[in-house]
Amino acid sequence: MEKELGVPLFHREGRQIRLNTYGEAFLEEVEKALQALEEGRRKIADMAGLDKGIIFLDTTFIPHFPDLLNMFLKDHPHVQFRISQAPSLEIKEELLRSSRIDFCISCHPVQQKGMCNIPVKTEDIVLVVPFTHWLADRQQADLIEAAKEPFIGFKKESSFRETTDELCRRAGFVPNLVCEADESKVVTDLVRSGLGIALLPESLVDQDETVHHVHIREPLARRTYYLTWKQDRYLSKAAAAFRDFVLRHFSDLS
């Protein structure tokens, strides 16, 4: 290949080999060609009726999403889902840009040219406190009232952590994070133990006799979920049906 192109594609140092500037440029074009081949395969499979339907989806947890998938699959039993959960918006953006997924569901719109972002659901972010906490008898509070409290938060790689950090900044303080976790259940369990309080989407609060959630008056504490896809990516019949189903479902709920 290097002989055909007339330039070297790699830096070679002993046993080590890595792409040079020419190689990186060539790889980018090869990836585009492979994407075009895959798009063509999907189109032909759709036309021939050979593809039972595989939908590639990267998702942030959205309330009742498993129920949504179940409803769709009842009407489309031959469709299969390939679901991933990228830890950051940047990785989701790359998956979309490179056409490795059909859709992503995220709490942030993808700010890239050629992307279509449709808001599908909005929910409150609430303070979660132990029932022994002084806020436990409140239904509402300003977030600044909790400024001096120890907080349980998600790890920095989480997109929701970005949301809660920004929420506290708007309230006028930096939270005192005493512990970080990966999952909402772990966060809730740590709150339940009395280690601190937390900010969580209301749908993820497993309220029982040991924890209580408080709605936030100021600042506005909500998050919106977006269904995003790349406009020039060919969507199979299955993928297009799923997109329309999701948009129709959440439109009926609003």
Image (cartoon, rainbow, N blue to C red):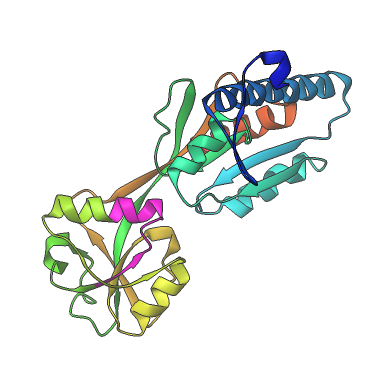
Asked whether, in this view, residue 106 is left or right of residue 17, the answer is left
Asked whether, in this view, residue 27 is left or right of residue 124, the answer is right
Quadrant location, the C terminus:
top left
For the point 38% across and 59% down, the residue is 202
Q: Which stretch appears magenta?
A: 151-164
Pick whichever, 34 or 178, lies toward us: 34
Pick whichever, 58 or 131, lies toward us: 58
Tell me the quarter of the picture where residue 208 sits: bottom left
Horizontal and vertical percent position of residue 172: 10, 55
Residue 249 visible (yes or no): no
Residue 44 visible (yes or no): yes
For the point 89% across and 28% down, the residue is 50
Horizontal and vertical percent position of residue 156: 35, 58
Horizontal and vertical percent position of residue 195: 30, 82
For the point 77% across and 25% down, the residue is 42
When the figure is inspected, residue 128 is found, relative to residue 98, above or below; the finding is below
For the point 83% across and 41% down, the residue is 78
